[in-house]
């Protein structure tokens, strides 16, 4: 089985543009005792199907500003029961639907940054019918300009797989307190074959969550169905 990195196709004939934030967040960590001074976290951990509306302290999750490690750890424990089994969380995790504005035309697949994918509802149904595994679409709360807007869904991608140690710098480490990494994305990234999933065809890499990785099955389905908006580049494995 081959694996591919998904990237936006700059040649796709669509003018789509969107801007928004997520409904809720786990806060980034401020001055982590394990990392040192600064702000640590990323919203590339994303669970757009999660609904936190029943929590009594909902306002704490509406504020994305950095907070001390103990606040992050308390809020993380509170949301874990709302998440799918095996969910991976980190400082800055985005929860719930994206809220914002969109304009222009959108193809079947759309990436407005390297770690963010939307799929039109009809394209999601086609991929599911084609046998793509583990693909769940979550509604967005985007306001569109113009008539007959598309229904864009954001897939809730599982966090799986690691980077192979051969592509990491010698001093690479992950903070044991907050989970943040202290190194940049290797170029090129190399996947650790022993950690890759066999039951889902599109996922975020646990070793670097802004990387959206597709299996050969997913890529073949996209090409067979003629779905545009995204290109795929094979990633090395060891």
Image: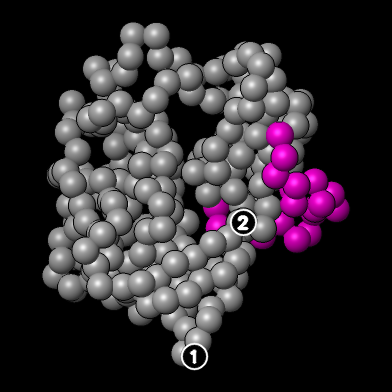
Q: Nearer the viewer, mark 2 or mark 1?
A: 1
Residue found 54% across the figure and 25% down from its top: 180
Instruction: Examine the rendering and report whether any part of residue 203 can be seen.
Output: no
For mark 1, give the secondary structure.
loop
Of the residues under marks 2 and 1, which one precedes in the sequence? 2
Q: CA distance from mark 2 to mark 1?
A: 24 Å
| Residue wearing tag 2 | 22
Q: How many marks?
A: 2
The spot of residue 118 in percent (x, y) is 41, 64
Residue 86 lies in magenta, yes or no?
no
Give residue 230's position: percent from left, percent from top: 26, 60
* 117 sits to left or right of 75: left
Closer to the camera in the image, 104 or 156? 104
Residue 83: x and y, percent? 60, 49
Q: Is residue 60 magenta?
A: yes
In the rendered image, the quadrant that contains the C terminus is top left
Q: Residue furthest top?
A: 170
Specify few, some or many for label 1: CA neighbours under 10 Å numbering under 14, 14-19, or 20 or more. Answer: few
Q: Is residue 30 visible?
A: yes
Q: Where, by quadrant of the figure, is residue 100 drawn? A: bottom right
Q: Residue shown at 55%/58% (left/top)? A: 48
Q: Residue at x 39, y 9 (%)?
A: 171
Residue extending farthest bottom: 147
176 vs 40, nearest the viewer: 40
Residue 55 lies, in percent from the top left, at 80, 54
* Magenta stretch: helix, strand or loop mostly: loop
Per the image, the residue denoted by label 1 is: 147
Q: Is residue 227 left or right of residue 124?
A: left
Question: How are the colours assigned in the image?
Answer: one colour
Please report the bounds of the magenta region as a residue range. 47-66
């Amino acid at each position: 089985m081959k694996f591919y990195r998904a990237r936006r196709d700059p040649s796709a004939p669509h003018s789509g543009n969107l801007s928004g934030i997520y409904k809720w967040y786990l806060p980034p960590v401020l001055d982590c005792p394990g990392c040192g001074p600064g702000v640590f976290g990323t919203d590339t951990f994303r669970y757009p199907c999660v609904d936190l509306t029943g929590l009594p302290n909902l306002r704490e999750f509406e504020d994305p500003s950095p907070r001390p490690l103990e606040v992050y750890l308390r809020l993380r424990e509170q949301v874990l029961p709302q998440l799918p089994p095996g969910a991976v969380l980190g400082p800055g995790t985005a929860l719930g639907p994206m809220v914002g504005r969109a304009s222009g035309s959108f193809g079947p697949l759309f990436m407005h940054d390297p770690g963010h994918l939307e799929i039109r509802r009809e394209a999601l149904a086609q991929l599911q019918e084609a046998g793509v595994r583990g693909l769940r679409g979550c509604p967005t709360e985007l306001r569109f300009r113009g008539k007959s807007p598309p229904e864009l869904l954001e897939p809730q991608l599982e966090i799986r797989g690691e980077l192979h140690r051969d592509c990491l710098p010698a001093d690479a480490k992950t903070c044991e307190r907050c989970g943040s990494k202290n190194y940049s994305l290797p170029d090129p990234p190399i996947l650790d074959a022993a950690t890759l999933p066999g039951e889902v065809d599109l996922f975020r890499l646990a070793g670097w969550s802004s990387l959206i990785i597709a299996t050969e099955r997913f890529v073949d389905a996209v090409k067979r169905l003629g779905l545009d908006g995204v290109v795929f580049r094979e990633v090395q494995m060891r």
